[in-house]
Image (cartoon, rainbow, N blue to C red):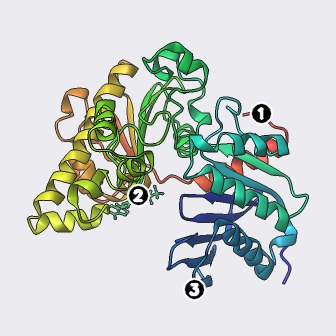
Amino acid sequence: METTGPHILTVNTGSSSIKFSVYDMDERSLLKGEIAGIGRQEGSVRVFFSDGSICVDENTRIESFRKGAVVVTRCLEETGYVGSIEAVGYRIVHGGMKYREHCQLTEELLEYLRDIAHLAPEHLPQAVEVIEEVERGLPSIPGVACFDTAFHRDMPEESRIYAIPLEFYREGIMRYGFHGLSYEYITDALCACGVPLDRVIIAHLGHGSSMTAIRDGRCVETTMGFTPLAGLVMSTRCGDIDPGVVLYLLREKGFSADRLNLLLNHGSGLLGISGRTDDIRKLLALEKRGDERAILSLRLFCHSVRKFIGSLSAVLGGLSTLVFTAGIGENSPEIRERILDGLEFLGIRLDTERNRANQKVISDKQSRVMVMVIKTDEERMIARHTKRILNGEGR
Ligand code: ADP
């Protein structure tokens, strides 16, 4: 089978998965796939065509990211897309101090990513492995690197700098911010429907959660920091905690760096508090049965989002639009309602019916703040940048 292009392949490497999509030049998605559970006992490969029909659906062990990338190119061969791919766009979690904008992939950039792997040890080494393998499978096809940190590159210094001696900032210890591709997609979507970007907060609430504040189209503050561990209470990450807690665990409890990493990145947040699960749907079900730890975990989560809506509104000097996005933000009316409860003083008035129906605008007509639910699409954003950069177009 042969499929005529030109097409763009997008590759999004996570901490245990690779998501990939094929787009045409009008941003229509033709094929979507996910290789999940990489390195685990039980992995899976699921690939769908744009009409929803299944292309591959199997449970299989995928030992490494390199093997996962081989599955991606094999899948392109089997579906006939391999010859039509003109460019590959990669999601890269971190561009360090040097790569602040999305750009064409070069050997020099790959080398830099290998050098800064310690900045995102759970993402960058895997992403580099996947790039190497996809480049082997699709030789001489140009690549574009899309950085999750790029959206936040122009944050003012008071938002970027940690109040530790300034030398650390100069060597790159600063707030970078993440989820940038999602924020870019949402701001493009707001522009497309004529919503002004004067004072906007976007709440990306998924497995990883963060929020960002946009004034006059520019990102001015965000909740994640040097790493994606900071800010909101998340599924398994702790979010903001007093660094004194880390010192205490190191000194008094004999924690090693690896054990601390496991605790703060994988054993905290909703999972750590509930002791049962990090999935909001399951936590809501447990709450109905009176599970106290589940109740507490949901209270902590909503409180943390509410607190940051307040502080980001203060940074913006007011709020005109609040957007919920990602798994929890898009799909959970209960959680949105709880977060917004008590924020009437900011001018937020929820329309309960519209909220329950997951409508695009969920505030009522009297609300001074427009509250919206918009589905994010990071892969589409990668395809958009890839086309733009390879065509030599500006932003
Ligand atoms: P990721 O950050 O891995 O891309 P997602 O944005 O897909 O994650 O969000 C995953 C989370 O979304 C899940 O952990 C789950 O808690 C939540 N979620 C998904 N669907 C629903 C739903 N219908 N109701 C409540 N929560 C949901």
Residue 32: assigned label? none
- Residues at marks 1 and 2, CA–CA distance in whole angstroms: 31 Å
The residue wearing badge 3 is: 58
Query: Do residues under tags 2 and 3 come within 8 Å of each other at their CB atoms?
Result: no
| Residue at 32 percent of width and 47 percent of height | 362
Q: Quadrant of ligand 1?
A: bottom left
Which of the 4 quarters of the picture holds residue 164?
Answer: top left
| Residue at 55 percent of width and 20 percent of height | 169
At label 2, the amino acid type is Gly
The residue wearing badge 2 is: 327
Q: Earlier in the sequence, mark 1 or mark 2?
A: 2
| The furthest residue to the right | 140
Q: Earlier in the sequence, mark 2 or mark 3?
A: 3
Left/right placement of residue 213 relative to residue 280 reads: right
At label 3, the amino acid type is Glu
The residue wearing badge 1 is: 394
Residue 196: x percent and y percent? 49, 30
Residue 330: x percent and y percent? 39, 55
Label 3 sits on a secondary structure element that is strand
Label 2 sits on a secondary structure element that is helix
Residue 55: x percent and y percent? 65, 83
Residue 183: x percent and y percent? 52, 41
Which of the 4 quarters of the picture holds residue 356?
Answer: bottom left
